[in-house]
Image (tube, helix red, strand yellow):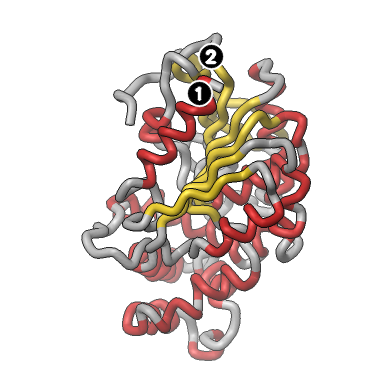
Amino acid sequence: MYPPIEPYAQGRLDVGDGQRIHWETCGNPGGKPALVVHGGPGSGAGASWRRLFDPAAYRIVLFDQRGCGRSTPPASDPATDLSVNTTAHLLADMERLRAHLGVDRWLLCGASWGSSLSLAYAQRHPQRVTALVLFSVVANTRREIDWVTRDMGRIFPEEWARFRDGVPPAERDGDLSAAYARLVNDPDPQVRDQAARDWCAWEDVHVSLAGGYQASPRYADPVFRAGFTRLVTHYFSNLGFLPDGQLLRDAGKLAGIPGVLVQGRLDVSGPPDIAWQLTREWPDARLEIVESGGHGSGHGVGERVVAALDAFASA
């Protein structure tokens, strides 16, 4: 990865609905425009994303999606309205940001939920995308949500039982993401925080089948924990606000856009079959499997992402 850098410009863009999204630009102001699309939903665009790009070659744009990071109002505040926080809203925000920054076309780099949002943007605005570099690829289908919230209990039975038992008995055989979405919006702050803790404990379990993965320190922050769980359960319980399977069915719309999909073989959160299915319908995409990789940029995944971005910078 490249050395740490700081933004040369930043601000908050008013996108309507009382929402202001934080954005920043780094690297070369005259370089190839690239947009970072972070995961979660609700993780925010951390500084480590900047280090994936050659700062001499790229004009790197980062933004915090609605409700998270430095965008306002924060989803951690239970009074913040999430009805104006959907995929359609985020796609419109990305277009407003592109116009605000005077970018004609840009490369998109996204991970996990950010890969889904990048795919949705590119399918809706293919003329605005020069390339896609995605890792830990997911498509937010019903099958994937059920896999993460229920079927993975076959791999982590004890941990999943604790996750399931975090919701009332009457809801344990139903949609667990919807049950948790209700709990993290409960009027009682103790109920909200316990549900957020239980959800984040499960998040820490299912990042990889490899040993050596450490608990994420960000979940220890009660403000981050509250906002993250409100957003991720909001999106999970609504299938990412997309028709089920749309991103896979419409992958052919990406024809002509080059892409690199980097996937860890041991990524149990986002199994490699999703990325593989995309490449069956998207002729300009290449799938790279990292045998030791899990969910995220560790264990060799980040190096492959950097190599793909370097290649597109010099293309």
**Viewer-side residue, 137 vs 284:** 284
Residue at 59% from the left image edge and 34% from the top image edge:
108
Is 25 placed above or below 298 here? above
**Seen in the image, is 158 located left or right of residue 110?**
left
Q: Amino acid at mark 2?
A: Gly
The residue wearing badge 2 is 31
Visible residue check, residue 193:
no
Residue 189: quarter of image: bottom left
Q: Secondary structure at mark 2?
A: loop
Residue drawn at x 56%, y 75% as measured from the top left? 146
- Measuring from the top left, give residue 13's x and y in whole percent: 62, 26
In the rendered structure, which disc, 1 or 2, sits on the residue that comes first in sequence? 2
Q: Is 236 positioned to the left or the right of 86 in the image?
A: left
Q: Residue furthest left?
A: 212
Task: Please tell me whether residue 11 is drawn above or below residue 181 in the rendered image.
Answer: above
Q: Which mark is residue 60?
A: 1
Residue type marked 1: Ile
Q: Are marks 1 and 2 in contact (CB under 8 Å)?
A: yes
Query: Quarter of the image holding residue 216?
Result: bottom left
Location of residue 156 (image quadrant)? bottom left
